[in-house]
Image: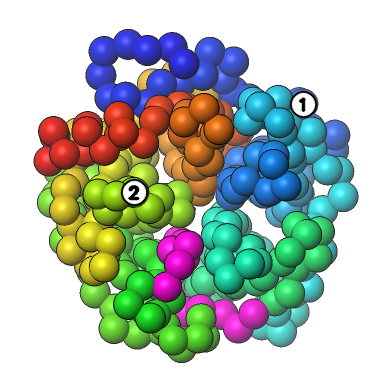
Amino acid sequence: MTKRLGPPLYRHPSNPILTPAQMPMECTAVFNAGAVRYNGKVLLLLRVENFAREVSFHTATSDDGLHFTVNPTPIDYPPHPLEQEYSSYRFDMRITPLDGQFYVCHAVWITGLGSMIGMAKTTDFAHFEPLPYMSVPFNRNAVLFPEKIRGLYARLERPTDEGGRIWVSYSPDLRYWGDSRPLNVPTTVWNWRKCGPGAMPIKTKEGWLEIYHATAKTASSENYYLGVLLLDLENPNRIIAASKKFILQPEEVYECVGQTPNVVFTCGAVEMKDGTLNVYYTGADTRMCLAQTTVPELLSYCRENA
Ligand code: BMA
């Protein structure tokens, strides 16, 4: 970790850690990976775009969380009937270990209808069983909590296309969702436009720690930031603390130049054995980057800047 003054989320000096040029297939972008610990390794589920802007998803695994071996064979995840009927593509898989399996939630763009949330489950990350869609349009981001809360499954989501806030919804069976409420994240200069979930919420003694994405418009672009929230363990509708300072903003060339300029965006973080929290994030929707912290540091920062 290269520490410096400012938020306790430190860019890895080897950034970017995975670029299109390093991939075993021809592609223009590799980004927005879900991340999880699997069989003792860190596993990323990468969104890969080819020169026709078609999307495929590939796993990459690593022992140290930094050097990844990419599987050139895409995952086997049969399309939903709607995806066969309309022109569509999937994006941004967020992974949650739950009930002894792994669930992925992702956005599906369906031309003429909009974006909604698809879901699948897997045990081996090669074959994915499609499950019913979790939402109607518009919804672009959803992530499941890793356990039931007061007897119900729970998710964070951003049920809007442009702009929008983080909502919490509940389900008895992962199929029917309701009791939805927006989180009242205090509005700041950097999170007023979009405010949506990022990595899977991390359970701590003090509450659920959530690294989220947020945007604000500047004179020249819409800039993406990462922020941090602490939610009540028993009632995640209740915010215990929300840092009014962001934890990451686009600054480096690899975050400012690419398919979408000025974007840092996360779909997953993994706690390593030594206590380091690896936050995998996108630089400008083009390549994968790594920033590191620890859960205690993030908790303190969240509370001290609330
Ligand atoms: C979000 C999603 C992400 C993307 C981000 C920045 O709304 O579409 O896939 O990384 O915008 O462009």
Which comes sooner in the sequence, label 1 or label 2? Answer: 1
Q: In the image, residue 238 lies at what x, y percent?
A: 18, 63
Q: Secondary structure at mark 1?
A: helix
Specify whether residue 108 is in view.
no
Write the residue at 34% across / 49% down.
204
The three-letter amino acid code for the residue at tag 1 is Gln
Q: In the image, residue 11 lies at what x, y percent?
A: 46, 21
Q: Secondary structure at mark 2?
A: strand
Residue 105 in which image quadrant: bottom right
Coloration of the structure image = rainbow
Q: Which mark is residue 40?
A: none
Q: Is residue 249 above or below residue 214?
A: above
Residue in the foreground of this view, choosing between 256 and 14: 14
Give neighbour class at mark 2: few <14, some 14-19, many 20+ (Cα, 10 Å).
Answer: some
Please name the residue that numbered disc 1 is placed on: 22
Q: In the image, residue 232 lies at what x, y percent?
A: 23, 60
Write the residue at 69% across / 41% down.
40
Please name the residue that numbered disc 2 is placed on: 204
For the C terminus, the image quarter is top left
